[in-house]
Amino acid sequence: MDAFQAAELGVLQHLQVSFYHWDKVMLFLSRASDPRNSFLWYFPVAFCLSRAVGLKVIWVAIAAEWCNAIMKWLLHGDRPYWWVHETKFYTAEDRPEVDQFELTCETGPGSPSGHAMVTTAVFFVMMSELASHIQLRNRSQANDIRDRERFIGRLPWLLLVFMTTGVCISRVYIATHFPHQVVLGAATGIVLGEIFVRLRLESLSFGRYIFFSAFFFLSIYGQYAFLCGLNFDPMWSLKLAMQWCAEKTWLNLDTMLFYAVARDVGALAFIGLAEALPLTVPDRVGQYPLKLATAVLCLVYAQGIESIALPRDNLYVFYVLGACKYGLVSLGVVIIKFVLFKIFFTKS
C-alpha cells in the first residue's frame, strides 16, 4: 500500500507543480464542495423550487455523510499531508515535500473523500431532476426546437461531470486526499444519488424522521464504542493532524466526524418536525420570481445562522449546539417558504 500511495503522491506533487498558480481556484472548489453547503446552499434553493427535490437533497446529503463516517473508520485511510511524514517508505534524504494550504488540515480519516461523496450525491440528485424537467418540456416542442432542447438536456450531466472532476482534483491538489480516496468518494456518491433520485420522501411521517435520526446517531456511536472496546483509538487521525499540520490555526473542529453526525441528526430531526407541522404549501408550476425570491431570503437566513460562532471549550456542548444550529437552518427554510407562499397566494 505504501508503494501505491507513493505513486499517488507523485500525482499530487505533479498537480501542485503544474498548477501552482491555480491555488485560489482549487481552494474555491474545495470550499464549494464542503458537505455543510448541502444544508446552507443546495437544500434551501432546491426546497424553494420544489419540496420533493429539496427533501431528496437533504436526505441524500445526510445519507452520504453517514456512509462516509462509517467507511472512514473502517478503511482507516491516511491523508497525504501526514502520511508523507509518517511512512517508512522514504528515508530522511528522499522524503518528498508536500505543500499545505489553509483547507488542508482536516482531522478525520482520509478514505473516502466526504467532499467528493456528498457533493457528487447532491449534485446527482439535482442534475437528474433538472434533466427530467427539461425532458418533459422537450416532449411538447416542435422537432427543430426539440433538437436544441435535447442538447440542453445533456448540460446538467456535463455540469455534474465538471463539478465532480473539479472537486476531486482540488482535494488532491491541497494534499487532503489521495486520488483513490476521491474516486471512491465520487463513485459512492453516484450510487447514493441513483438510489435517492428514485425515492418519494414527501409522505414520510415524523416518527420515521426521528427513527432515522436516532439510527444515524446510534450506529456511529456504536461503531465508536466497538472500536474503543478493541483498544483502537477512533480519534487517531486527530492526533496526526495536530502533529503534522503546518499551521495550527488551520485545524478545524468542524471537520470531525462526530460534528458531521451531529449536524445530520439535527437537520433531519428538525425538518421532520417541520414536515409534521401544517407548514406544507403545494408547489405550483411556474411562479419562478416568487420561488427565487424565497430562495434568496432562505440563503440569507441560512448564512446568518451559520455565522453564529459556537463555544468550543466543551466538545459535547459543541456537538449539541451544532445539531441545533443546522436543525434551525432546515426548520427555518420550511417556515420561510410557507409564510411567503401563504402571503402571496392569499393576496392573489
Image (cartoon, helix red, strand yellow):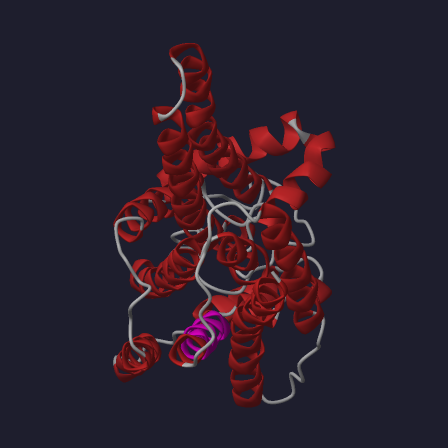
Chain part drawn in magenta: 258-271
Q: Nearer the viewer, residue 339 or 38?
A: 339
Q: Position of residue 313 (x, y in %)?
A: 65, 88
Q: Where does the image place residue 275, in percent across and percent down from the top left?
A: 40, 74
Please report the residue visible at 42 percent of the width from the left and 76 percent of the height from the top: 265
Q: Is residue 164 above or below residue 139?
A: below
**Residue at 45% across / 43% down in the picture?**
178
Q: In this rendering, is residue 83 above or below 343?
A: above
State the residue lying farthest toward the front. Answer: 348
Q: Is residue 265 magenta?
A: yes
Q: Is residue 88 visible?
A: no
Q: Main secondary structure of the magenta part?
A: helix
Q: Does 98 lie within the magenta span?
A: no
Report the quarter where the C terminus lies. Answer: bottom right
Q: Relative to 51, is 202 on the left or the right?
A: left
97 w.r.t. 295: above or below: above
Q: Nearer the viewer, residue 244 or 311?
A: 311
